[in-house]
Image (cartoon, helix red, strand yellow):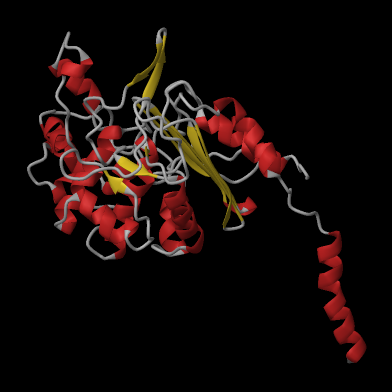
Amino acid sequence: MKQKLLIGTLVPVFLCLFAPLPAQVSSPQIDDIFASLKSSNAPGVAVLVVRNGMPIFRRGYGVTDLRTLHPITPQTDFRLASFTKQFTATCIMLLVHDGRLRYDDHLTDIFPEFPEYGKAITIRNLLNHTSGLPDYEDILTKQYPDTPENKIPQILDAGVLKLLEQQTTGKFPPGSKWEYSNSGYATLAMVVEKVSGKPFAEFLHDRIFAPLKMDHTLAYEKGKNEVPHRAYGHTNEKDGWRETDQSPTSAVLGDGGIYTSIDDLVNWDRALSQHTLLSEREMQPALTPVEPSAGPAKLAGGAPVRYGFGWFLDPYKGHKRSYHDGSTIGFRTTIQRFPDDNLSIVVLANREDLNPADLALKVADLYMSGARH
């Protein structure tokens, strides 16, 4: 019996000694990827790498704005743009968890005054971009022909819903095709307000940000709150950098209005890994690719795409991945999560001339290529 016990004890030790070790990547290796962005007078990025649940790299490059020249730090808040959509989806999923909403509820169940074409649109369609809702930005542009962008008044989520209620038909039958829809996520913000009885920004705070101690994260509403440690967006033009921080659609919250920092996103990533807000079973719909009835989901250029609720799900070099990018005037962002590798990478930029996803995947390659100290 003692011999058997000894063998049973040694086998795991043997396996540990000879099993492949996870790639060890040094901070200088990661820093090299972003070295060209070090500056005391140009906008830049904040970078977060989480490995096995621990933040192992948190660093800022460049400045928050050209007026103060404050350096970007792990506490700097960036506008997330469409990275926001995973938070909006989580709000809906929390209402389903509460029993106050179902994924198969229809748009007209929530808003009875919505036109006939909304009767076939479900909450699930809104979440996975198969609703066929018209693009509110296209509608807004048609309402203000030949008008400079800075002269078009900012629209809110409620205004988006009103624009959609003025339409008589969708772009395609709900569920038949996949087409990325900011209109759908602005509408979801209004669904949260109607079902919860709280403003969307307040629901986000009470159900996500406060419980996760994301103390410096908020849905920015001009005149109602202020962004702490705020980074301002920039565009690189012929005569240098220009602050380009707001557009007519920047006040829409559901599709892209959250500001946060890489420090707060450590808590968000941990909550996703540990299923703090929603159980693993409850998260499954968000991580299950939609299958439109008319054929596989495809991007506008024809490339296949996998999308759940607020997450793209295409693998990377054979590694399971959930991710989302964000792009709006003056900002570019990405979160890249590799759950089987216990690896998450976030890159937030307050400049338009970068592709944060490309930069984040260069970091991922360090781990996946077996790099060592």
The residue drawn where x is 42% and y is 52% is 264
The residue drawn where x is 17% and y is 33% is 160
Number of marks present in the image shown? 0
Q: Position of residue 305 (x, y in %)?
A: 49, 34
Image quadrant where residue 174 sits:
top left
Image quadrant where residue 236 sits:
top left
Seen in the image, is 237 located left or right of residue 313?
left
Q: Position of residue 233 (x, y in %)?
A: 36, 28
Foreground of the two, 32 or 82: 32
Foreground of the two, 30 or 185: 30
Q: Position of residue 315 (x, y in %)?
A: 58, 40
The residue drawn where x is 57% and y is 36% is 360
Q: Is residue 301 above or below residue 50?
A: above
- Pick the quarter of the image with the N terminus: bottom right
Seen in the image, is 256 located left or right of residue 17?
left
Foreground of the two, 38 or 121: 38
Q: Position of residue 126 (x, y in %)?
A: 29, 42
- Pick the quarter of the image with the C terminus: top right
Is residue 302 visible in the rendered structure shown here?
Answer: yes
